Image (cartoon, helix red, strand yellow):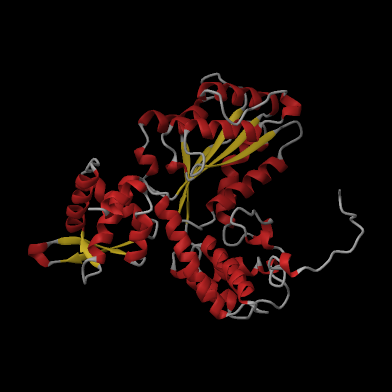
Amino acid sequence: MTPDSSSSSVDDPLFDSGHRIFSNKDLLKIGHVPEADRIVGRDEEIAKLAKRLNGAVHGYSPENVMIYGKTGAGKSLVSRHVSQRAQNAAEAGVSIGTAYIDCAEDNTETQAVSSLAAKLNDESITDITVPHTGLSTSKYYKLLWKTLDAQFDSVIIILDEIDLMNDDSVLMKLSRAEEAGKIDCSIGIIAISNKIQYIDKLNERVRSSFQHKELFFKPYDANQLREIMANREDAFRDGVLSEDVIPLSAAFAAQEHGDARKAIDILRHAGEVAYEDGAAKVQEKHVRQAQQHAEKDRFRELVNGAPTQAKAALLALTELSVNSDDDAFLTSRVYDQYERICEHLEMDILSVRRFRDILKEQAFLGVVEIEKINKGSAGGIHLQNRLIEDPHVVRETILEDSWMRDWAAE
């Protein structure tokens, strides 16, 4: 039975769901794409990306783009925003499709291609059904090519966190599809990564077919973070936020590499904490509690998504930190500990050079801090590594991995 929409609603505290605090909580979702006037500090990046996708709007091939930047720098937001605008701005007679793939979730070739085919397919136009599972990778590609040619002149595909894909087959096949005669539709790829070394690790054939332009996103500063959160203030009821909530949330996020995603997380968590406390307003104490929650969530997300070798490297630094009065260690000492962990877990041991690269990647992501120290003319320059997060929290998070857990039983 469908309720009469004209009947008045009944207030029931059992189903309050935070309405004393929030008015539109969707504005605080990480995947939310705001209107153009709510996007802060990214005018230059928007313009540069639009220039690369301009071809699609006018009926010819868009360019491929590789976007780098730390977590929360607006990479995904700008990519989705500009893609939507390109789709809306298409000239008469030009049809543009857009699709977003989270490679942390669809991290195999088959998953990514089946998701693309399903997202881009309009069965009422193509008369094609795309099953979620059950087909081979090659059959999913054939369905994808058919759906694209049946509907679009160009397609803009966003591959977010592409470095988490199991291999580079998807990038290779999508970027070569038109040239190989698989489709008449042109494809523009926006590949997004936190790792500046990602392209260097691709084989030469993939780099040659991708032929990308690069775009780097700098972290937001504290003023930009305050403006970003002020633009989401209407997620809350009028008068609910104390004056110091947004500045303090911005300050916390600015300390952690200008992460807008973290700033919004803190703001949302603060509202949730205030609601759980039964408070009428969101105050400084709620922000401080929320910051602790957000930091743990962010760290768990980074570590849980890291490759096994990166977890082993972090575990090595963690073991030294937990079992020593020191908090910073030379790379050579961390590597020795890493070797012991790999031998115990029967893992391949990477070269010292590759091990250093992993630590640099973790520093780029804000998990590790690396400092150069000068030991004089005889000792030379050395690198010291320090965990940014509490070592006990790091250890607990890493040992959630079933493989790493075997180390704890040593």
Which residue is at the front of the view, 363 or 48? 363
Residue 164 versus residue 28 in the image, above or below: above
Residue shown at the point (65%, 65%) measured from the top left: 232
**How far across and down, in percent of the image, does residue 117 sit?**
61, 30
Whether residue 105 is visible:
yes
Residue 247 drawn at (x, y percent): 56, 76
Please provide percent x and percent y for residue 64: 52, 37
Instruction: Determine if residue 23 is in view.
Output: no
Taking depth in this image into account, of 300 and 9 the one nearest to the observer is 9
**The image quarter in which residue 276 lies:** bottom right
* Residue 152 image point, x, y percent: 68, 29
Farthest residue in the right direction?
6
- Give 168 or 265, whichever is nearer the viewer: 265
Q: Residue furthest top?
A: 181
Compared across the picture, whether 371 is left or right of 293 comes to left
Quarter where residue 264 is shown: bottom right
Residue at 71% across / 33% down in the picture?
95
